[in-house]
Image: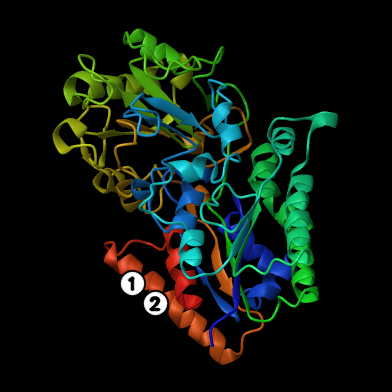
Amino acid sequence: MTPERLVILDIDGLRRDVFRRALADGSAPHLAGLLGGPEADRGLHFEPVSNAPSITFCCQSSLFTGAHPEQHGLVGNQFFDRFGRHSQGVPRHYAFDVGDTLAVDDAVRVFTGPAGLIGDLLAPETPTLYERVAARGLTSTVAYNMIARGASHWLKPSLVDIARFTKGGGLLGLSAEQYDGAMLAAVLAHLRAGARPAVLTAYFMGLDHHSHEHGPAHQADYLARVVDPQVGRLVDGLRELGLWAGTVFAVVSDHGQIAVIPDDQHSLRLSFPFDREMGYLFDALGLDVHDVPGEDPNCDAVVACNGGLAHVYLRHRAGHWADRPRLQDDVLPVARAFWEAHQTGRHAPDLHGALAAVLVRDVEHAGWEADYQACPPEGVLQPVDQYLATHLEWETVAAGSRLQHLASPLCGDLLLVANGAGGFYFGPPVRGVHGGLHPAESEAVFSLGWPTGSPTQVAVLRLAAEGAVRDRCRQEGGRRAGLVDLVPAVTAVMGW
């Protein structure tokens, strides 16, 4: 009664509304075929929310560990480890997407070494799906994804291709379609060489990249023109190799995207050597902010930009980075300055109108696990859900629980929320962005299908998956289904 193998189709950045519409209008026939049509007659649809921040490395880590950011430790594409947990006690800024200070080492190390930088940083007490599978004596293959710790085989993109894809242009560039095509070719070559993994993850990163460049309105075209035909070629390969029968498919995404304005005014940065939009605020407060490569420990503040959200780390002015910053002396003055810049342009004119909210953690009194609270302009802290009830202009989904599962020693003392509705975001100019709490960037995809399963087998799949997700959500305060539910759902379905 149990399936023989699991294939995970991980489509980075795919909005749920785009996916469901493509299933319904027939523009994604191969994906629809895996699920039994738009209503998933041979499986089921979940409606998960993304992490906070709804950004790739944080979200992919939750997908493949079943752990929240507070547990797995990857709290963004960029974050600051004020304790130096992985750097001999020396505080360290991480930027897997290169970041504004142009420190490229992290981006390179993501795909180097036995487990890559992400595998090294993931908390050891949060096993990956592949480590769980290996413990049962089963094999797994990961293609082009940054999380492969414990996998039997890791098919990595070449560093040259990554550079051409992410930074190249013109004749030297590699298109999103070419990058995804190279991933699929690597998967098919691997299977044709005799690999028979119990779990296969195929990571389609091109759609997110295409959507950043052209805007989320172009997702539907890329899904229909590129991803779905490539899924069809994978299905043909599985049939050809006798790997079709008994295979369950999971179609997932890590976040969505919202449309923003691709100009210097709306892209908020702290970039070396130019674009110091936020830097002027710290200058006005007499704070040395991290804005030069390698400056990490020798500064008073660090900003980690993650699209719709930005962590702000503040050092205890009379102590060290590992000391808890003081709420009244170190934290609230900066929070008030950001609000003042937003309202009047004081300190940093480019921040005028740029923020939706400023969130604060009182680690001085509540410890390093302190939850985020809303910090209105008048400075009186209040619970996030209470603040949201009186600020309906800030459109979010499941914000309270998502922020609760983010808060950890690796998070910022402030969390800045960009005014996405006004087209603002933290990062370089793009047309589509994610990272925040808005529904469009937060509603992800998670669908299961067993195309060769009998009606009874499909019914058992539904019961197992729904039960696993329902139980996990109930255990965690009745939260919404999320990315962390992929692992419990598929392990229940597969009988692991």
- Look at the picture and state if 51 lies above or below 232: above
Which residue is more in the foreground, 50 or 393? Answer: 50
In the rendered image, which quarter is residue 250 located in? bottom right
> Do we see residue 204 in this rendering?
yes
Q: Identify residue type, mark 1.
A: Asp
Residue contact between numbered discs 2 and 1, judged by CB atoms under 8 Å: yes
Residue 47 visible in the picture = no
Q: Residue at x 44, y 79 (%)?
A: 464
Circle 1 residue: 471
Q: Quadrant of residue 223?
A: bottom right
In this rendering, is residue 76 above or below 427? below
State the mark number for residue 467.
2
Q: Residue at x 49, y 57 (%)?
A: 64
Q: Secondary structure at mark 2?
A: helix
54 vs 410, left or right, is: right
In the figure, is residue 392 to the left or right of 451?
left
Residue at the left extreme, as displayed: 365
Residue 164 lies, in percent from the top left, at: 74, 34
Label 1: how many residues lie within 10 Å, few (<14), some (14-19) or many (20+)? Answer: few
User: Would you place residue 58 above or below residue 140 in this image?
Assistant: above
Q: Position of residue 113 (x, y in %)?
A: 57, 40
Q: Amino acid at mark 2?
A: Gly
The colour mode here is rainbow
Q: CA distance from mark 2 to mark 1?
A: 6 Å
Sort mark 2 into few (<14), some (14-19) or many (20+) by Cα contacts within 10 Å. Answer: some
Disc tally is 2
